[in-house]
Image: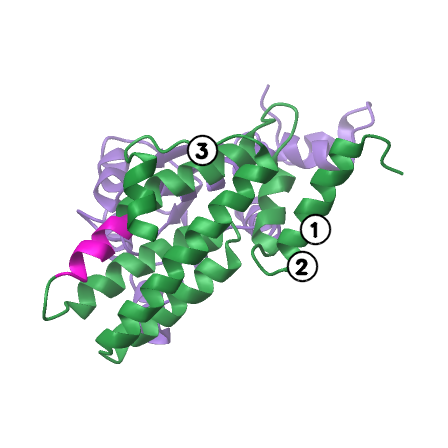
Amino acid sequence: MERNPMRRQLAVMRQSLFDQGYLDEQFVQLEELQDDANPNFVEEVVTLYYRDSARLILNVEQALERKPFDFNKLDGYMHQFKGSSSSIGAKKVKAESTLFREYCKSGNGEGCMRTFQQLKKEYATLRKKLEAYFQVPIIFQFFSLSTLLNMCF
Amino acid sequence: MVLGKGASSSLSMKMADGAEDMVNNNNFTVLVVDDDPLIRKLHDMHLKNFGLRAQVVENGKKAVDLCHVGANFNLILMDREMPVMNGAEATKELRAMGVNSLIVGVTSCGSPNEKQAFMEAGLDYCFEKPLTPDKITFLLQELNKNN
């Protein structure tokens, strides 16, 4: 039985991230790589993800402002973004990226735009939940938090 | 300390299951080729856990240049889509240079055609990203067989 109420709360938080479909098995793989020699590995990987993928989000954002849409380019960015997202087990974010790519392949601009809004929401929600779980803000090194928040809402 | 294939059986000390594997893996060198720093970090960590030393580079050209100046790797993990030189081109060049390493494609879902083209560039195997412990175990078995 978990004596420490804080740890119990974290365990509950963690479980709900899986139960609610925010994270999948890939996240567990990350946790299994964490050990005494690398005690913050999961947090480092997640931070790296949010740092690097911010650039891709920005690229997609800018590409969606140029008409007509360059679906190949959009698909290219999303391919990368999906790869990173699935590596950290970001289940909902990954699902939206898959949908976005399908819209790219069928040349559906409306679908792309709609899906991108949803993707950004999921991306931001996951970050908030993971910040709560790690209990530290996930630092963006290249983009200010306000810029990113403006992009998301 | 260099151990040959049969050496582990003559060691008198008892070793834990994982440790015995690590002894055999100590001499394998791995090159991770991927433009995504997240993947490079992940794969490097996975490999470390198996006692493998990995070098990491961010595109196919760097991989080719490394091998060109004489670096030797038992295993090369090759991403497909990279800037400057992609995985398929890099694999073709490496094979043309006479590189005999186990070259394994590690890609995000591509169409069967893309995967086929990648394999035909000269890969030994092609896996979906990201690498997992059981895939690494499989690759180590292949490496041990060939050595």
Q: Position of residue B45 (x, y in %)?
A: 52, 35
Report the residue marked by disc 2: A19
Q: Colour of chain B?
A: purple
Instruction: Chain letter for mark 2, please.
Output: A
Query: In the rendered structure, are the residues bearing label 1 and label 3 in contact, judged by CB atoms less than 8 Å apart?
Result: no
Report the residue marked by disc 3: B54
Above or below: residue A28 compared with residue A132:
below
- Going by the numbered disc 2, the residue's amino acid type is Asp
Name the colour scheme. by chain
Q: Position of residue A28 (x, y in %)?
A: 63, 48
SS at mark 3 in the image: strand
* Left-right relation of B123 to B10: left
- Going by the numbered disc 1, the residue's amino acid type is Gln
SS at mark 2 in the image: helix
Report the residue marked by disc 1: A15
SS at mark 1 in the image: helix
**Boundaries of the magenta span:** A56-65
Magenta stretch holds residue A13: no
Closer to the camera in the image, B6 or B19: B19
Query: In the rendered structure, are the residues bearing label 1 and label 2 in contact, judged by CB atoms less than 8 Å apart?
Result: yes
Closer to the camera in the image, A85 or B82: A85
Above or below: residue A8 compared with residue B125:
above
Of the numbered discs in the image, which one, if any, rests on residue A77?
Answer: none
User: To which quarter of the image does residue A32 belong?
Assistant: top right
- Going by the numbered disc 3, the residue's amino acid type is Ala
